[in-house]
Image (cartoon, grey):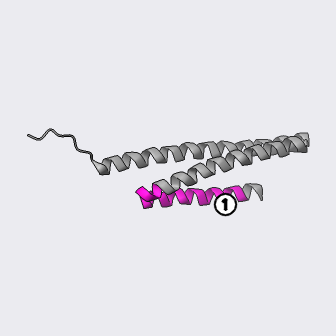
Amino acid sequence: LDFSIRVDEGAEAKMKVAGYLEKVANLQDRRNGLYQSMEDAMVKFKSSKDNNSFQASLKRIAGEHKNETQAISELLTTVKNINPELGDKVGELQRLDRVYRDHQTG
């Protein structure tokens, strides 16, 4: 009988990708929160007309959004190397986020 431990590379790759995709989902949740913060800032600006506060909020939100988007881009490269099909889905998420961001700021 052979009781040696063998690494199942297929299962290991699936677990790695699942972990990366969980990180992507968490980052996307944070981006969604930032979009809500942007909408809240716009509503507050409409009522208070405080341009300085509004600009400061937008600058902070844009910086955080850039960080989250960069982190997802880095994960995209990693996921794409392991599983190109899932990498394409993460790429589509990035593309749709760009469209939404352009719509929201434009």
Task: Give the left or right position of residue 28, taking residue 11 as reference.
Answer: right
Task: Give the left or right position of residue 15, taking residue 3 as reference.
Answer: right
- Residue 10: say if magenta: no
Estimate the x, y position of residue 58 in percent, counting from the top left. 79, 46
Q: Nearer the viewer, residue 97 or 72?
A: 72
Q: Is residue 18 above or below residue 76?
A: above
Estimate the x, y position of residue 47 in percent, counting from the top left. 88, 41
* Residue numbers of the magenta segment: 79-102
Q: Circle 1 is placed at which residue position?
A: 99
Look at the image and tell me in which quarter the N terminus lies.
top left
Estimate the x, y position of residue 6 in percent, counting from the top left. 23, 44
Residue at 26% x, 45% y is 7
The secondary structure making up most of the magenta span is helix
Residue at 56% x, 56% y is 93
Estimate the x, y position of residue 74 in percent, counting from the top left. 55, 53
Residue that extends furthest to the front in the rendered view of this protein: 4
Q: Nearer the viewer, residue 92 or 77?
A: 77
Residue at 62% x, 47% y is 68
Q: Quadrant of residue 82?
A: bottom left
Q: Kindly identify the amino acid type of the residue bearing the numbered disc 1.
A: Val
Task: Give the left or right position of residue 20, taking residue 7 as reference.
Answer: right
Q: Is residue 74 above or below residue 34?
A: below
